[in-house]
Image (spheres, grey):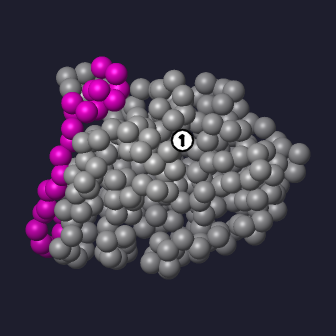
């Protein structure tokens, strides 16, 4: 299979080619790195968010919108399907890189993580990328600077001029859309954390409502996590049985039923103080090839209606 970063670079080029139509921006930093603006100074939109999610999965997932209902209200949902879940979701899409410099703080997702490959999931999957380019999507209210690109380039082992940084605030249309595309990744990651071999996950489809854009970054982070934990649905096709499938959904956590604004407030918005098990979809169907089909979890539309301000 081609390099994940090479795949994502083709999508970054597509974003550059259609920047005007997508209402996104591009800026070359002093060190030659390229920032793609998906919601800072440019408006962006649903199509921009879908393309961003494709970049985050290195082109190994199909991402689209559909209409559904939450508490009787028509609402956009994002649906993502991948037949390469270990690579696309764990080794690329997962927001596993905490990017911190003197002038920036944000979460990094995308295939540049596979150039560093120090997170546990890379050992589980047995993958490390080799590429002269690095694509790292940054979720932050801050605009990436040259020092951010240099930090990424240094850890990824590439030149700063070969770094591409799609950047998006959570409190934006593209931010809401790209986060809604994470339901499948959350379920796959939970399975992996519970001890299931991620290479035995054959195919995953996930869906979650697109949270209405909040007025500030903290509210947006809370609302988009509510969308996943109380509205996210996932279908997984796997090879082997497992006695802990019921733990991959948010209903397995003691915090289920609590708004994420309250969860984050209880730890002074230090996300790393929150138990990882709360970051899970609401409901899942697990189809074991040649075996049983397990249905676990449930959605909470009443909580979502409150979170979304219906």
Figure quadrant of the C terminus: top left
Q: Residue furthest left?
A: 292
Badge 1 density bin: few <14, some 14–19, many ≥20, Cα 10 Å: many
Residue 197 x %, y %: 34, 76
Check residue 216 for magenta coloring: no
**Residue range (magenta):** 287-310
Residue 58 x %, y %: 54, 56
Residue 306 x %, y %: 29, 26
Query: Please, is residue 60 above or below residue 233 in the view?
Result: below
Q: Quadrant of residue 244?
A: bottom left
Residue 2 lies left or right of residue 82; in this view the side is right
Q: In the rendered image, is residue 262 in sight?
A: yes
Residue 248 lies left or right of residue 36; in this view the side is left
Image point (21%, 42%), residue name: 299
Camera-nearest residue between 41 and 259? 259
Q: In the rendered image, is residue 67 in sight?
A: no
Camera-nearest residue between 267 and 135? 267
């Amino acid at each position: 299979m081609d390099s994940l970063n090479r795949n994502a670079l083709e999508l970054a080029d597509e974003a550059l080619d259609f920047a005007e139509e997508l209402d996104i921006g591009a800026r070359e930093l002093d060190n030659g790195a390229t920032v793609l603006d998906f919601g800072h100074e440019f408006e962006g939109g649903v199509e921009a968010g879908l393309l961003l999610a494709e970049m985050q999965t290195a082109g190994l997932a199909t991402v689209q919108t559909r209409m559904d209902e939450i508490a009787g209200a028509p609402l956009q949902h994002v649906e993502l399907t991948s037949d390469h879940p270990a690579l696309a979701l764990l080794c690329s899409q997962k927001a596993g890189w905490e990017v911190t410099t003197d002038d920036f703080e944000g979460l990094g997702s995308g295939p540049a993580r596979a150039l560093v490959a120090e997170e546990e999931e890379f050992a589980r999957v047995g993958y490390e990328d080799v590429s002269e380019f690095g694509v790292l999507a940054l979720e932050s209210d801050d605009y990436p600077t040259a020092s951010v690109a240099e930090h990424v380039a240094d850890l990824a082992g590439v030149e700063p001029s070969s770094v591409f940084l799609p950047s998006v605030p959570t409190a934006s249309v593209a931010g809401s859309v790209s986060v809604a595309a994470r339901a499948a990744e959350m379920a796959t990651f939970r399975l992996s954390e519970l001890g299931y071999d991620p290479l035995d996950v054959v195919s995953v489809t996930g869906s979650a409502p697109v949270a209405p854009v909040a007025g500030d970054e903290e509210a947006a982070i809370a609302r988009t996590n509510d969308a996943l934990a109380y509205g996210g649905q996932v279908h997984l096709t796997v090879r082997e049985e497992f006695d802990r499938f019921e733990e991959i959904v948010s209903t397995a956590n003691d915090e289920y039923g609590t708004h994420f604004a309250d969860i984050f407030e209880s730890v002074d918005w230090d996300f790393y103080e929150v138990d990882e098990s709360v970051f899970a979809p609401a409901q899942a169907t697990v189809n074991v090839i040649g075996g049983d089909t397990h249905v676990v979890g449930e959605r909470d539309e009443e909580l979502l209606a409150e979170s979304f301000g219906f």
